[in-house]
Image: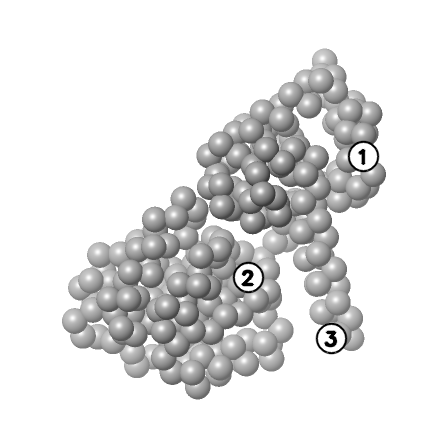
Amino acid sequence: MNRLVILQENLEFTRKVWNYLMAKDAKLYLSSLAVNSQEAMERVSDLDQEDILVLDFEIKSEDAFELFRNLKRRKRPLPYIIAISGQGKLVHRLQKYSSYFYTTLYKPFPFNRIIHTIEKIINETMPKTKEDMVKGELRKFDIDVTTKGYKYIVEAVLLSLEDETLLKDMTHGLYHIMAGKREGINEKNVKWTIEKMVRSIKRFTSTKLIKSYFYVVEEEEVTPKRFIGTIAEKIRDKLEYEEERKQERG
């Protein structure tokens, strides 16, 4: 599910966009509205790469550019950015950063253009399976997706989604099942690979993100059990949310 932040002085425009999307039951998990860059700064700090930021660069333009530069300084992928501007003096400056934007909309533009753009992003990022959801969560961290450890983590989360009791005694539960699927691999091999992967993630991912995502004070508290269990818990919450929305729609 995507989160949407709109930085736009015209609150009527902002509410119209949001109300239209909600009426269509778009897959938006959280919305934040901001009428100045200071408000937006507080809302964009934890945006992930599947989230959406509608950024009007004509709002105190220097502040808007500073917000964008702050986003770039983070050691995390940028969200989908829809840049908005008039056809005037900002065009040249925006072109400098165009590779960072999903698209740029120049005023005046039809209302349905921004709606279609947001809907397109939502459709592109919508997870199709539980495995897609797991991989989507893992993209929030600095992780090498080509490694065996990454594949083990994905499998471990999927297994714990099916049976969370596997995490109680990981050696005889989760690791035992994973080892049983592989010839010549035992529980110690699986344990070592996953522990190495978790250490690597903690090393290269920002400390702030690790602490906030796993609800810990110290990075050392993020054990493999906590890492796998927390991701599985967040995915369960999203699945429950989706189920509730389906029931509400009847």
- 185 w.r.t. 201: above or below: above
Q: Secondary structure at mark 3?
A: helix
Tell me if mark 1 has few (under 14), some (14-19) or many (20+) residues whose alpha carbon lies within 10 angstroms of its own. few
**Residue position for label 1:** 168
Going by the numbered disc 3, the residue's amino acid type is Arg
The residue carrying mark 2 is 2
In the rendered view, tell whether residue 116 sits above or below residue 98. below
Q: Earlier in the sequence, mark 3 or mark 1?
A: 1
Q: Residues within 10 Å of mark 2 (few under 14, many from 20)?
A: many
Which residue shows up at 36% across the image and 79% down it? Answer: 9
- Coordinates of residue 200 in the picture (x, y in percent): 52, 29
Report whether residue 54 is seen.
Answer: no
Say which quarter of the image contains residue 192. top right
Relative to 217, 160 lies left or right: right
Say how many tags the image has.
3
Q: Quadrant of the C terminus?
A: bottom right
Closer to the N terminus: mark 2 or mark 3? 2
Is there CB contact under 8 Å for labels 2 and 3?
no
Marks 3/1 in contact by CB < 8 Å: the verdict is: no
Q: Nearer the viewer, residue 154 or 40?
A: 40
Does dot 2 land on a helix, a strand or a loop?
strand
User: What amino acid type should be assigned to the residue bearing mark 2?
Assistant: Asn
Label 1 and label 2: CA atoms lie apart by 32 Å
Name the residue that disc number 3 marks: 249
Residue 26: numbered disc: none
Real-space Cα separation, disc 3 to disc 1, in angstroms: 37 Å
| Spatial separation of the CA atoms under disc 2 and disc 3 | 19 Å
Foreground mark, 2 or 3?
2
